[in-house]
Image: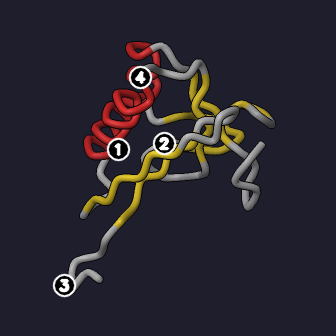
Amino acid sequence: MRNGKSPLHVFVAVLGFSRMLYIEFTDNMRYDTLEECHRNAFSFFGGVPREVLYDNMKTVVSQRDAYRTGQHRFNPSLWQFGKEMGFSPRLCRPLQGTD
């Protein structure tokens, strides 16, 4: 068990078909930490999926349904990172976790 006053956060990545799992614990939820966790997960998986599904994290989505239903405003840094790495970000429906 962790003994300390600072919060502990967890990054979880699961491949859709194989259900292969990657978990990383962090001490913050900053964007640069999120990007590093992605890079570590992609290295662990041995590649980058075409699509990455997210919940409604503030580091990922600026505004849900910003342009119209299903057209979300993503964090520009995440959008650029996705282009560089070769994946498209997508949001799951609130309270669903899988779509």
Q: Earlier in the sequence, mark 3 or mark 2?
A: 3
Q: Amino acid at mark 4?
A: Gly
Rendering coords of residue 59 (x, y %):
42, 47
**Horizontal side of residue 36 vs 45, given as left or right:** left
**Quadrant of residue 69 within the rendered picture:** top right
**Quadrant of residue 92 within the rendered picture:** top right
Real-space Cα separation, disc 1 to disc 3, in angstroms:
22 Å
Real-space Cα separation, disc 3 to disc 2, in angstroms:
28 Å
Q: Amino acid at mark 1?
A: Leu
Question: Is label 4 or label 1 in front?
Answer: 4
Q: Amino acid at mark 3?
A: Gly
Q: Residues within 10 Å of mark 1 (few under 14, many from 20)?
A: some
Which labelled disc corresponds to residue 60?
2
Q: Residues within 10 Å of mark 3 (few under 14, many from 20)?
A: few
Real-space Cα separation, disc 4 to disc 3, in angstroms:
34 Å
Which labelled disc corresponds to residue 87?
none
Question: Is label 1 or label 2 in front?
Answer: 1
> Given contact means CB atoms under 8 Å apart, are the residues at marks 1 and 2 in contact?
yes
Q: Earlier in the sequence, mark 4 or mark 1?
A: 1
Q: Earlier in the sequence, mark 4 or mark 2?
A: 4
Which element type, helix, strand or loop, lies under badge 4? Answer: loop
Rendering coords of residue 65 (x, y %):
71, 40
* Residue placed under numbered mark 4 in the picture: 46
Which element type, helix, strand or loop, lies under badge 1? Answer: helix
Real-space Cα separation, disc 4 to disc 1, in angstroms:
18 Å
* Residue placed under numbered mark 1 in the picture: 34
Question: Is label 4 or label 3 in front?
Answer: 4
Question: Is label 4 or label 2 in front?
Answer: 4
> Given contact means CB atoms under 8 Å apart, are the residues at marks 3 and 2 in contact?
no
Q: Earlier in the sequence, mark 4 or mark 3?
A: 3
